[in-house]
Image: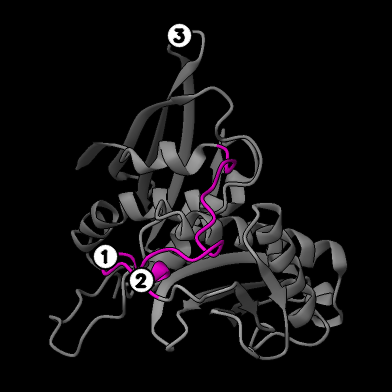
Amino acid sequence: MKFNRAIPLVFLVLLSACGNLPQPFRETPKVTTDNPLLDMPTAVGIAVLPVQGAPAPVNTQISTAVAMRLQSFEIPAEAVPSNGGLGFTLQGEARTIETTATETLLVITWILRARRGAAVRTYRQVVAVPSNLWQAGDPATASRLGSEAGAAVADMINGIAPAADGPATAASPPRPAFPTVSVKPVEGAPGDGRESLRLAVIQSLANNGVRRDDVNPDVTLTCQITSTAYDANLQKVEIAWRAVGRDGKELGKVSLDNTIPNGALEGPWGPTAFAIAGAALNDLLTLLASQPRAP
């Protein structure tokens, strides 16, 4: 079974530099009905609250780093314990997925709320951090996480990144029973894609009922990124996932490809990892649903 798609154009935008972002909280824009981020003309900035579920002092270290990152894009923001009058509120909620003696895997859900309390954008950030630094706090780690989240929120304000899908409703049909899966690091990925794309795929699959098992999985999912020159300024990138059963037999392949600017995948992937994982998700679920679970 093979799936092959082109990476949506949004990746090109997400991978572009974040300069020249609009400044929606400057001056007094007219009220608009199609952009909830501009629904309050008197909004003067973003109050970034401490991360819920994160231990002190890392909860405030991250929020401070997010506010500083937003300020670097000329978006008024301030790290505060509570919103005392700023137009919008941004808060992250940390949830631990897995903890080992050395590493903590967690997802931080960032929700941007308008002045009246309505959630206008959501960004999920999956990260792996050393367990001791997460518990004790570490300015360098907090700066890395906050800088990544701040850049994603700036993209959301600019209307680039789509709002995350909400939870399934009670009327949704039951999900199929998927085999257990182990997702391996992404081979050939530049920047931090080796781990960030892997973690984004793990979280996307988990959100859809796929259980992770790195000890005795029904299916092992590997990923390979290859890049070839297209012209002086562009490169063609293919991202290929392969599913292999316990017996070593290949069960299927899912591929994404597109032409992007040279060097666009260098450095932190941030929301791009989730965009790529989301683009492949339906095909990966279809592939996994076709495989019988072990008794």
Point 42% across, 36% down: residue: 12
What element does badge 3 sit on? loop
| Residues packed near mark 1 inside 10 Å, few (<14), some (14 to 19) or many (20 plus) | few
Q: Does the magenta stretch include residue 20?
A: yes
Q: In this view, does 246 lie above or below 85?
A: above
Q: Earlier in the sequence, mark 3 or mark 2?
A: 2
Quarter holding the C terminus is bottom left
Q: Which residue matches tag 3?
A: 231
User: What count of labels does the image hold?
Assistant: 3
Query: Residue 154 location, x and y as percent?
Result: 55, 57
Q: Which residue matches tag 2?
A: 36
Is the stretch drawn in magenta largely helix, strand or loop? loop
The label nearer to you, 3 versus 2, is 2
| Residues packed near mark 2 inside 10 Å, few (<14), some (14 to 19) or many (20 plus) | some
Q: Is residue 259 above or below residue 240?
A: above
Q: Quadrant of residue 255?
A: top left
Q: Which residue matches tag 1?
A: 34
What element does badge 2 sit on? helix
From the viewer's perspective, is 242 left or right of 76? Answer: left
Q: Earlier in the sequence, mark 3 or mark 1?
A: 1
